[in-house]
Amino acid sequence: MAQSTPKTVPTGVPVASFLATVADPARRADCETLVSLMEAATGERGQMWGGALVGFGLFRYHYASGQGGDWPVVAFSPRKTDLSVYIMPGFERHADLLQRLGRHKTGKSCLYLKRLADVDIDVLRQLIEASVAAMAPQRLFPPKKEVQK
């Protein structure tokens, strides 16, 4: 079976350029906060994946079918109605944190937030850090100690 080419790949577009296109100033500020949280957790600068996904770090995934690829360790996207935060290992082991997080919805590996003002930022930081730690065995590159600005 031939492997398919992923649709969402790194683009080389600067994250700051993408964030400048976020029209709502409050949504843009939330995105900048997420960049800070994810850079601190991964030790990696953000990178654009496709047209609207900001990813941090890199891991390799493999499916039973033999297909696989590379994907960000954590990521987010400012969608029309929500901020989508991608927590790769999912949420099963984080029920206690989710109860304390504030207003949110979840998918398999996606946390949907209307705005960061609706959640406890310290709890969100803990979720992001737990995700990064859980993905450590699959990371392609070791985290850097500090993100250079």
Image (cartoon, grey):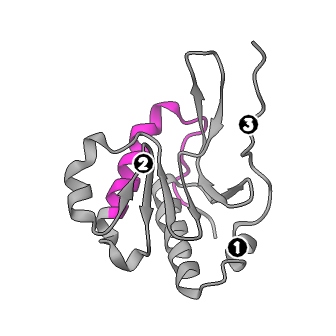
| Nearest to viewer (mark 3 / mark 1) | 3
**Vertical position of residue 21 compared to residue 10: above or below:** below
- Residue furthest toward the top? 1
The residues colored magenta run 124-146
Whether residue 62 sits left or right of residue 86 in the image: it is: right
Identify residue type, mark 2. Answer: Gly
In the rendered image, the residue lying farthest to the bottom is 25
Q: Nearer the viewer, mark 3 or mark 2?
A: 2
Mark 3, residue position = 6
> What SS does tag 1 mark?
helix
105 or 77, which is in the foreground? Answer: 105
Which residue lies most toward the front here?
Answer: 81
Q: Give the quarter of the figure containing the C terminus.
A: bottom right
Q: Mark 3 or 2 closer to N-term?
A: 3
Q: What is the quadrant of residue 21 in the picture?
A: bottom right
- Density class for disc 1 (Cα within 10 Å; few <14, some 14-19, many ≥20) is few
Residue 7: x and y in percent read: 75, 42
Q: Quadrant of residue 18?
A: bottom right
Image location (x, y in percent) of residue 80:
59, 70
Q: Which residue is mark 2?
A: 107
Report the predominant secondary structure element of the magenta stretch.
helix
Dividing the image into 4 quarters, which one contains the N terminus?
top right
* Of callouts 3 and 1, the N-terminal one: 3
Residue at the (27%, 68%) spot, across then down: 102
118 up-or-down from 13: above or below: below
Please report contact status of discs 3 and 2: CB closer than 8 Å, yes or no: no
Kind of residue at badge 1: Ala
- The circle drawn on residue 16 is 1
Amino acid carrying mark 3 in the image = Pro
